[in-house]
């Protein structure tokens, strides 16, 4: 099961654009923006089509079922049906949720549109069909009554989503969970946490204390699968800046908007791919290593040739070797152009392959082609090699982190071979970046996300 967490924020987002409280200031300084909470499961099931659900270039073209939790504007913007109708090409769509939410959607499509509207109540079930097989959905009561703030009056729902490779509990907005109605065990729980340390908020939402109570109850009732991930969503500026550390203490977490959570991956499914680029001594290798260090199985693919006559070079290599954990597997590939691609093809699910770096790999490709004075031959050799590497990158079930250099941002090289290398590496970086899910640039030790989402040790 693949869960794309499109947004993790509350109705006013975090930071609130109108607010200058310490929590909002901290989020701005860290470059964190949390849009309204929404998720896509297995590319075919969208939960909560709010105003942020299609932002940021998200691909929703595979969605065939839309679930609405309740008729609030942060969870339902019926204008999504306009965008769908202009692009659907006649593909059928199921829109389901509480009756008030479904009725608000009806006027947004014509009478002949291939849309089925289905009102749901607690206990109702439906099946969503996508490219990865069937997903079974069951609606659950949410404690979000418009009458008393806590009752289960049917105006809001939670959802269980289960498939052959995992299960999800999507729980926002609610004051408490309907524990007697839960099935589980769940591999992923997206659980709302709106009010942080503000215990006297008087709303049908969770704060840190009640969130912790719900997590403890899920564990006590055996509702969590081994290794289950509990992710806090519907986050607002009422939460503290150190929320990640506070949640870690109870086995929960926060993730950036755009994060992809995977459960029970098909052995043939490609892993996650990250390219880390930056200038010399920017901290890019340290960044890549820090992302891999907590992972259970890591293969380090070294592309650097050994130059025994160059003590400064030997010290650089020695520095890399000394800081690598002893349990990492090492594969040295400088002697064979196809070595990196071969290492990727040998990757297995659950493994992380760290390639450091593509800069020296390009050097080896041109060296072996003896083409430093022949741009046409050098380009042809690199094109063949990069096509093989990208093919392996797209098929390996392992997660892959690749390191490369940015060499085209400074003074133009004084030699023809230097300019050739600059151009070839720029071409390779562009091709690999297009093939990766995520791209980061590291400047002065600070990573910034250029594409996809920021990685953490648990990504």
Image: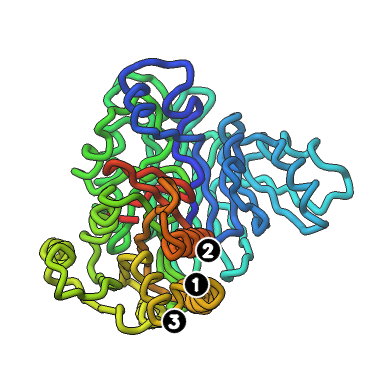
In what element is the residue under mark 1? helix
Q: Residue 390: x, y in percent?
A: 49, 72
Identified at 57% across, 69% down, the residue is 132
Q: Residue 49: x, y in percent?
A: 61, 41
Judge from the rendering whether residue 28 lies leftward or rightward of residue 116; answer left or right.
left
Q: 7 or 231, which is in the foreground?
A: 7
Judge from the rendering whether residue 174 lies leftward or rightward of residue 350; answer left or right.
right
Q: 192 or 287, which is in the foreground?
A: 287
Figure quadrant of residue 143: top left
Identified at 86% across, 43% down, the residue is 110
Q: Which mark is residue 369?
A: 3
Question: Which residue ends up furthest to the right in the rendered image?
Answer: 112
Mark 2 surroundings within 10 Å by alpha-carbon count, few (fewer than 14), some (14 through 19), many (20 or more): some
Q: Which mark is residue 431?
A: 2
In what element is the residue under mark 2? helix
Q: Residue 189: x, y in percent?
A: 39, 51
The mark that comes first in sequence, 2 or 3, is: 3
Mark-to-mark CA distance, 2 and 1: 8 Å
Q: Judge depth for marks 1 and 3 and give the one in front.
A: 3
Mark 1 surroundings within 10 Å by alpha-carbon count, few (fewer than 14), some (14 through 19), many (20 or more): some
Residue identifier under label 1: 390
Q: Contact (CB < 8 A) between labels 2 and 1?
A: yes
Q: 361 or 288, which is in the foreground?
A: 361
Q: Judge depth for marks 2 and 1 and give the one in front.
A: 2
The mark that comes first in sequence, 2 or 1, is: 1
Q: Contact (CB < 8 A) between labels 2 and 3?
A: no
Q: Residue 165: x, y in percent?
A: 45, 69
Identified at 77% across, 40% down, the residue is 82
Mark-to-mark CA distance, 2 and 3: 20 Å
In what element is the residue under mark 3? helix
> Up-down: is 15 above or below 273?
above
């Amino acid at each position: 099961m693949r869960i794309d967490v499109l947004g993790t924020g509350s109705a006013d987002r975090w930071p609130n654009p109108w607010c200058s409280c310490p929590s909002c200031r901290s989020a701005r300084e860290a470059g964190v923006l949390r849009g309204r909470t929404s998720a896509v499961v297995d590319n075919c099931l969208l939960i909560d089509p709010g105003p942020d659900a299609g932002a940021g270039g998200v691909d929703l073209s595979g969605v065939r079922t839309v679930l609405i939790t309740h008729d609030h504007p942060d969870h339902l913007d019926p204008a999504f049906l306009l965008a769908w109708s202009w692009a659907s090409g006649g593909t059928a769509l199921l829109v389901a949720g509480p009756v008030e939410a479904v009725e608000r959607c009806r006027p947004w499509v014509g009478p002949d549109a291939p849309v089925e509207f289905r009102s749901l109540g607690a206990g109702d079930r439906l099946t969503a069909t996508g490219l990865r097989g069937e997903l079974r959905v069951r609606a659950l009561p949410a404690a979000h009554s418009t009458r008393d703030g806590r009752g289960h009056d049917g105006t809001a729902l939670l959802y269980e989503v289960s498939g052959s490779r995992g299960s999800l509990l999507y729980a926002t907005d609610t004051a408490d969970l309907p524990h007697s109605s839960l099935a589980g065990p769940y591999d992923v729980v997206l659980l709302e946490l709106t009010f942080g340390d503000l215990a006297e908020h008087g709303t049908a939402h969770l704060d840190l204390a009640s969130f912790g109570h719900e997590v403890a109850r899920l564990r006590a009732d055996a509702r969590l699968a081994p290794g289950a991930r509990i992710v806090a969503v519907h986050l607002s500026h009422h939460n503290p800046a150190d929320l990640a550390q506070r949640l870690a203490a109870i086995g929960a977490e926060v993730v950036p908007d755009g994060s992809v959570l995977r459960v029970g991956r098909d052995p043939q499914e490609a892993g996650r791919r990250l390219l880390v680029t930056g200038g010399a001594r920017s901290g890019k290798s340290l960044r890549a290593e820090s992302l891999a260090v907590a992972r259970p199985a890591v293969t380090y693919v070294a592309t650097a040739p050994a130059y025994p006559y160059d003590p400064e070079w030997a010290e650089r290599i020695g520095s890399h070797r000394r800081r690598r954990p002893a349990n990492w597997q090492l594969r040295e590939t400088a002697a064979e152009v196809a070595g990196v691609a071969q290492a990727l093809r040998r990757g297995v699910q659950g493994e992380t392959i760290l390639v450091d770096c593509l800069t020296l790999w390009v050097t080896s490709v041109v060296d072996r082609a003896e083409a430093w004075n022949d741009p046409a031959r050098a380009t042809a050799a690199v094109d063949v090699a990069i096509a093989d590497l990208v093919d392996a990158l797209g098929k390996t079930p392992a997660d892959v982190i690749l390191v490369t250099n940015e060499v085209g941002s400074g003074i133009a090289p004084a030699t023809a071979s230097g300019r050739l290398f600059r151009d070839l590496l720029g071409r390779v970086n562009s091709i690999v970046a297009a093939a990766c899910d995520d791209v980061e640039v590291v400047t002065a030790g600070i990573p910034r996300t250029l594409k996809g989402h920021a990685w953490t040790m648990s990504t």
